[in-house]
Image (tube, helix red, strand yellow):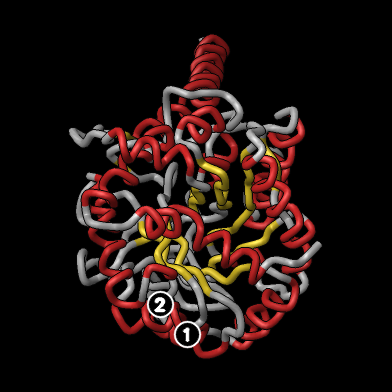
């Protein structure tokens, strides 16, 4: 009897494990990355303008999930076919390497709940309990997708890569750029020399923090919310030397102040909002927006409620208009946070809705071209290595 009970228990456990491996990754993403729809429409004039734009989005977390980004999917918000439908020239793909249990916008410890997802997604064991290992896996996924795309997806590492991409798109070629970023430098695992590891893995942009304090800086959502540490200051100098874009998204106010005081190249706020139109702690205040502008950088405005207090295109356009009115159109950008466990009104295929909302808000065509991608391209040319 005992052997029979043990046998049935083992079988049930095996079936539960198989269920988790086969179904849970998809269930997890569908529960976190939602598209709720919108009643907004695209005017004919906006559609014609949108088709001519070089659109660049500063932040998407698609590499976290168990999907092939080359294939059109019914879940999530980004894949290559939907980027093409949305006329996106350049998508920044970020590596989310650690998130805390009970994640919230106010205060988090540095616990790790991603190990379950990495195991159920059958990732390499080197990624199960290592933030650096997870980022290296995400980098390998991106390189693999580019290699399998028959030239339709290109990883952007240098200014020369960016210029070739834009020239080929202008010539009518079907090609989309992908720039690899990291969301929080906890994947350095406290070691300065791991910055070289990230660079060699293709990372060309890095946010210093995510939802918790780490060895380089304090997070807006951490326990201490401090500024740059000595390691963080050293990392900032090295990132600028190598040609890696500095991202202040999720940084504490003290971290933002320290980075803006040190920066010698344009700084980006890759995704979020502004407190003037949506008073959430993760959004920038006006002094911080002015500080980003002084570096020549851009403020990437998101598409979800905590960033812009709504999921309509007009909500994002309102925040973009505030940045324009405060510091000028040259510092406005798109930072969707697609596939970042957010609910949006539309996915990458329908970004023309935002172009239309900007026209409705009184943006000129030239200003829309800057806000929807031109400013990001300028910043990348100022920050990336030449070759």
The front one of 375 and 217 is 375
Q: Position of residue 324 (x, y in %)?
A: 32, 69
Residue 106 in the figure: left or right of residue 217: left
Residue under the point 26% across and 47% down: 357
Residue under the point 48% across and 50% down: 113
Residue 129's place in the image compared with 45, above or below, is below
- Labels 1 and 2: the sequence-earlier one: 1
Q: Position of residue 284 (x, y in %)?
A: 33, 73
**Label 1: few (<14), some (14–19) or many (≥20) C-alpha neighbours in 10 Å:** many
Q: Which residue is mark 2?
A: 252
State yes or no: discs 1 and 2 in contact (Cβ < 8 Å): yes
Q: Position of residue 35 (x, y in %)?
A: 31, 34
Q: Which residue is mark 1?
A: 227
Residue 260's place in the image compared with 36, above or below, is below
Rendered-image quadrant of the C terminus: bottom right
Residue 171 in the figure: left or right of residue 81: right
The answer to whether residue 25 is visible is: no
């Amino acid at each position: 009897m005992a052997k029979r009970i043990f046998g049935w228990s083992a079988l049930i456990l095996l079936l539960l494990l198989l269920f988790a491996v086969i179904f849970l990754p998809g269930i997890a993403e569908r529960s976190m990355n939602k598209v709720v729809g919108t009643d907004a429409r695209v005017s004919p004039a906006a559609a014609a303008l949108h088709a001519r734009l070089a659109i660049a989005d500063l932040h998407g977390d698609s590499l976290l999930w168990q999907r092939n980004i080359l294939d059109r999917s019914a879940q999530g918000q980004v894949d290559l076919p939907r980027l093409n439908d949305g006329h996106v020239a350049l998508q920044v793909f970020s590596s989310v390497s650690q998130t805390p249990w009970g994640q919230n916008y106010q205060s988090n410890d540095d616990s790790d709940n991603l190990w379950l997802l990495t195991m159920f997604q059958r990732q390499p064991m080197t990624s199960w309990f290592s933030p650096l290992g997870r980022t290296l896996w995400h980098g390998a996924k991106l390189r693999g997708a580019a290699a399998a795309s028959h030239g339709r997806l290109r990883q952007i590492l240098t200014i020369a890569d960016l210029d070739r991409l834009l020239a080929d798109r202008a010539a009518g070629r079907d090609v989309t750029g992908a720039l690899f970023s990291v969301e929080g430098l906890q994947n350095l695992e406290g070691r300065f020399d791991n910055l070289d590891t990230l660079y060699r893995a293709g990372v060309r942009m890095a946010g210093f923090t995510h939802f918790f304090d780490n060895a380089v800086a304090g997070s807006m959502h951490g326990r201490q919310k401090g500024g740059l540490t000595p390691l963080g200051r050293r990392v900032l100098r090295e990132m600028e030397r190598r040609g890696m874009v500095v991202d202040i998204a999720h940084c504490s106010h003290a971290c933002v102040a320290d980075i803006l005081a040190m920066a010698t190249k344009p700084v980006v706020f890759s995704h979020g909002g502004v407190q003037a139109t949506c008073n959430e702690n993760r959004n920038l205040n006006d002094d911080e927006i002015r500080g980003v502008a002084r570096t020549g950088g851009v403020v990437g405005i998101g598409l979800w409620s905590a960033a812009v207090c709504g999921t309509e295109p007009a909500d994002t356009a309102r925040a973009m208009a505030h940045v324009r009115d405060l510091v000028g159109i040259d510092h406005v950008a798109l930072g969707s946070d697609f596939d970042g466990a957010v609910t949006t009104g539309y996915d990458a295929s329908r970004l023309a809705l935002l172009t239309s909302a900007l026209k409705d808000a009184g943006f000129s065509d030239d200003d829309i071209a800057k806000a929807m991608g031109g400013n990001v391209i300028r910043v990348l040319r100022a920050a990336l290595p030449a070759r």
